[in-house]
Image: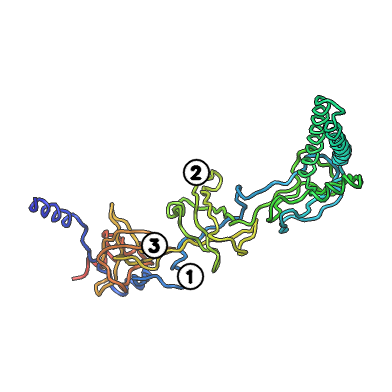
Amino acid sequence: MLNALLIVSAAAVAQAPAPQQVLISQEQINRAGIATMPALAALPDDGTAGGDAIVLAGTVVAPATAVVVSGTPWGGMVQEVHVTTLQKVKAGAPLLTLFSQPWLDLQREYVELAARARLATEQLARSEGLYADGIIARVRLDENRAAAQLAQLAAEQRAQALRAGGMGQAALAKLAGTRQLSPLHTVRAQAAGTVLELPLALGQQAEAGSSVARIVRDAPLWVELQASRQQQAAIAVGDKLTVAPGCQLKVNAISPLLNGANQTALVRAEQTERTSCLQLNAYVEARLARPRNQAGALAVPAAALVRRGAASYVFVRNAKGFQAVPVQPGAAAGDQVWVRGALTAGAQVATRGVVAIKGAWSGLGEAAADAKGQP
């Protein structure tokens, strides 16, 4: 068994491409405009090729689960607007005031029914006294008790409708006592947050059951980002993105579909905590942080990679010209690519004029012809 493993391992080593020398003189290097850059064990922490490997752009939006709608069960004309869009409001803050005839009718019905309920309650109290004295029969008492309960139920139904419209218990008691009706109905915010939309303007007619405001709660915001196909492949759910110092996002969804118009995929990220660094509808750029180093790998410019068959190579500068060194490309980091192979940190790899070196390597071009003429 051990012998079989050794044979397989030896075969794999034999099949691996070996470095090959490409003979090019200094004069040919200068003439071809060949330039080199060092292979890096760690990316520089200067915000260029380092941790900001991928930059995505998008728009700040409100989470659908954080949006609250404030509406009115009664129609009316908008008489006063108390807030504007993108304004922060507290729960119960006034949004709009409507001149509403249905609201006035509801108050009138409540006042009438509350008065009837009060009279029915008083009648029930008298009947209980008369029954205790033996003056009236039990049937009469039961009739008065049922009438009082029905009257109280009818008044309570109207009271609940008024509470749903924003009238408090103190205002209800005052209305029943003073009987002062008002056609002005104030629609209030159902939750604290930021006003996203006010579809009605001053003087417009609000229909019964219509929405008068959309409010987003003070919850972590979302950013909908656009990613190219290459960027989409490098991003995963759970990745951390940076918009600004102290403003972090976490990817929570990646669309599997591309937009047919611009060939981008939707990436949705959520604030890790609610801060004021993001504003609704703002255009932002988010950067995907990548580690500055990888175990057993070196970073080379993406332009340094060349393909020959199924293998990838970089051209490493030496005294005789360049050596074609086989490498295994890994993840990209901006304009750099992590590679593994027979490279050492600081080795000068060709980044410009790579086509000329590859031509000489293949036996083509001026450099190859000059190399063949060398003794």
Q: In terms of secondary structure, where does tag 2 sit?
A: strand
Mark before the other along the chain sequence, 3 or 2? 2
Q: What count of labels does the image hold?
A: 3
Q: Position of residue 226 (x, y in %)?
A: 54, 53
What amino acid does circle 1 point to? Answer: Gly
| Separation of marks 3 and 2 at Cα, in angstroms | 27 Å
Q: Nearer the viewer, mark 3 or mark 1?
A: 1
Q: Which mark is residue 162?
A: none
What amino acid does circle 2 point to? Answer: Leu
Q: State left or right for residue 10 relative to residue 255.
A: left
Image-quadrant location for residue 140: top right
**89, 135: nearer the viewer:** 135
| Separation of marks 1 and 2 at Cα, in angstroms | 31 Å
Q: Position of residue 343 (x, y in %)?
A: 27, 68
Q: State left or right for residue 347 relative to residue 74.
A: left
Q: In terms of secondary structure, where does tag 1 sit?
A: loop
Q: In terms of secondary structure, where does tag 3 sit?
A: helix
Disc 2 crowd rating (10 Å Cα; few below 14, some 14-19, many 20+) is few
Residue 59's place in the image compared with 161, above or below, is below
**170, 184: nearer the viewer:** 170
What amino acid does circle 3 point to? Answer: Ala
- According to the image, label 2 marks what residue? 257
Q: Nearer the viewer, mark 3 or mark 2?
A: 2
State the residue at coordinates (78%, 52%): 95
Image quadrant in which the C terminus is located: bottom left
- According to the image, label 1 marks what residue? 47
Q: Which mark is residue 302?
A: 3
